[in-house]
Image: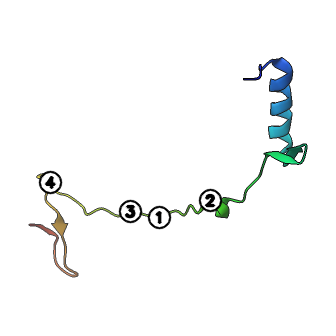
């Protein structure tokens, strides 16, 4: 395993700070990807409202909500 010294840390910090892809002898050692390339998306998870007893609160349009 190669030793990591202050000069290596400085080099890695400069590469990260410049936000550029870097290659060494034609081999990429730093790559930049778009967020879309990771396949992540944001979702909203909606949970039912619960009453004090932990029962689901069910409401009907125009009526008061009640517990079942």
Structural distance between the alpha carbons of marks 2 and 4: 38 Å
Q: Which one is in front, 42 or 31?
A: 31
Q: Report which residue position mark 2 lands on.
A: 38
Labels 3, 2: front one: 2
Structural distance between the alpha carbons of marks 2 and 1: 15 Å
Pick whichever of labels 4 and 1 is earlier in the sequence.
1
Pick whichever of labels 3 and 2 is earlier in the sequence.
2
Q: Are marks 4 and 1 in contact (CB under 8 Å)?
A: no
Rendered image: mark on residue 43:
1
Pick whichever of labels 2 and 4 is earlier in the sequence.
2
Residue sitting at 25 percent across and 63 percent down?
A: 48
Q: Which one is in front, 42 or 39?
A: 39
Rendered image: mark on residue 54:
4
| Apparent side of residue 4 relative to residue 23 in the rendered image (left or right) | left
Q: Report which residue position mark 3 lands on.
A: 45
Residue 23: x and y, percent?
A: 87, 45
Residue sitting at 77 percent across and 52 percent down?
A: 32
């Amino acid at each position: 395993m190669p030793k990591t010294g202050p000069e290596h840390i400085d080099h890695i910090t400069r590469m990260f700070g410049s936000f550029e892809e870097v290659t060494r002898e034609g081999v990429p050692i730093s790559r930049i990807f778009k967020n879309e390339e990771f396949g992540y998306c944001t979702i909203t998870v909606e949970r039912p409202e619960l009453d004090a007893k932990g029962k689901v609160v069910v409401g009907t349009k125009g009526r008061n909500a009640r517990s079942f």
